[in-house]
Amino acid sequence: MKKSLLAGLAMTLAVSGCANTSGWDSMSNTQKGAIIGTLGGAAAGAAISHNHRGRGALIGAVGGALAGAAIGNYMDQQKRELDINLASEVQAGNIVIQQYSDKSIKVTMTSATAFDTNSYQIKPGFYPTLNKIGNTLVKYPKTTMAISGHTDNQGNDVINQPLSENRARAVSGYFGGRGVYGERMSVYGRGRYEPRASNATEAGRQLNRRVEILIAPITE
């Protein structure tokens, strides 16, 4: 994925007339964010295509896909278990759990307990929380997880982009060690371009140094 991302970046910069270091450095943060966002979408599309190529194997590995009313029931039940198992973390503000109208679930973990600044090493104190999430993912195998890493705005893209990718990989690797089937997971780095809070304060930057897990049903 990294090679395809770099190739896509080079192509995008070439098209934009900025296929050199000075061109990239002269771009605004908005322009850089648009390019990285576009490449992220392209990477997601490639991952989806890959999943479709192996869709039959994935569906077979998880015991079949979901359809009709079973989708909502399955995802609602999974959301309830996450709410119960992570109640203390949610109350402490270390985890945010959201469910969308399409029944997908997003679990957001902050750096307050997960990551130090400029680090993608998961803090040991966060292992129990990841264990709870991982156990739930194993219990509900008919889902895929898009795991995205994010940073604050400190430093440049050369640092922040791979850092965000490595944070997502760290979480994916941890779940793999807990028995989550690897083909269910895809990993993305969003860098500093999707903040959920202001970067003007350390409290906001802590919220932005995070990993998000988007859990979606495997459907027919």
Image (spheres, rainbow, N blue to C red):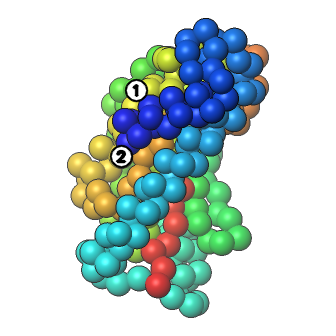
User: Percent position (x, y) of residue 163?
Assistant: 45, 25
- In the rendering, which numbered label is found on residue 172? 2
Residue assigned mark 1 = 120
Residue 109 in view, yes or no: no
Residue sitting nearer the eye, 213 or 11: 11
User: Percent position (x, y) of residue 33?
Assistant: 67, 31
- Kindly indicate the quadrant of the structure image that contains residue 209: top right
As drawn, the residue found furthest toward the top would be 22
User: Percent position (x, y) of residue 73?
Assistant: 55, 83
- The kind of residue tagged 2 is Ser
Seen at 36% across and 73% down, the residue is: 55
Secondary structure at badge 1 equals loop
- In the rendering, which numbered label is found on residue 81? none
Residue sitting nearer the eye, 139 or 195: 195
Seen at 44% across and 34% down, the residue is: 7
162 w.r.t. 59: above or below: above
Whichever of callouts 2 and 1 sits on the residue coming sooner in the sequence is 1
174 w.r.t. 121: above or below: below
Secondary structure at badge 2 equals helix
Seen at 48% across and 43% down, the residue is: 188
164 w.r.t. 88: above or below: above
- Kindly indicate the quadrant of the structure image that contains residue 29: top right
Image quarter where the N terminus lies is: top left
Seen at 65% across and 63% down, the residue is: 99
